[in-house]
Image (tube, rainbow, N blue to C red):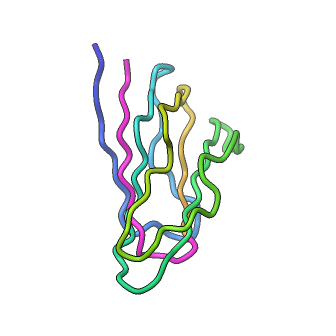
Amino acid sequence: MASFFNDSLRQIPTTETTVVTSTSDSTIVLSILIANREGVSAADITCAHKDASDVIQNYLAFTIVVPADANVDLIGNKYILPSGEKLVLSASTSGILDAAVSYVTV
């Protein structure tokens, strides 16, 4: 049976921070929404897929600009995250970006 989840990360820091760690080989990431709560300045977001050994497998987003008072969806399609692997986020400016990640495990 499928289980649906929404994980969030408020005030994304400038250092890589894990937002989702897969516990199933059938983890399907549906969306990664990034919101900029700052009304004045833009900030860049980076999202990486890391394996269980903390090695970057690839970037889903690399220094994507999130304008002030706006949001972006980092993936345009579904993304498979194998068991034990994770998605990490970092921002160019600490504390103004929030993330919401929707995913399903089967």
Residue 69 vertical position relative to residue 63 in the rendered view, above or below: below
Residue at 49% over, 40% down: 76
Q: Where is residue 56 in the image (x, y as percent from the top left)?
A: 70, 45
Answer left or right for 10 relative to 42.
left
Classified by dominant secondary structure, the portion drawn in magenta counts as: strand
Queried whether the magenta region covers residue 93, the answer comes back as yes
- Quadrant of the drawing holding the N terminus: top left
Residue 7 vertical position relative to residue 85 in the rendered view, above or below: below
Queried whether the magenta region covers residue 77, the answer comes back as no
Along the line of sight, which residue is nearer the eye, 10 or 39?
39
Q: Where is residue 50 in the image (x, y as percent from the top left)?
A: 63, 42
Q: State which quadrant residue 38 falls in.
A: bottom left
- Quadrant of the drawing holding the C terminus: top left
The magenta segment is 92-106
Q: State which quadrant residue 9 falls in.
A: bottom left
Report how many numbered discs are placed on residues in the image: 0
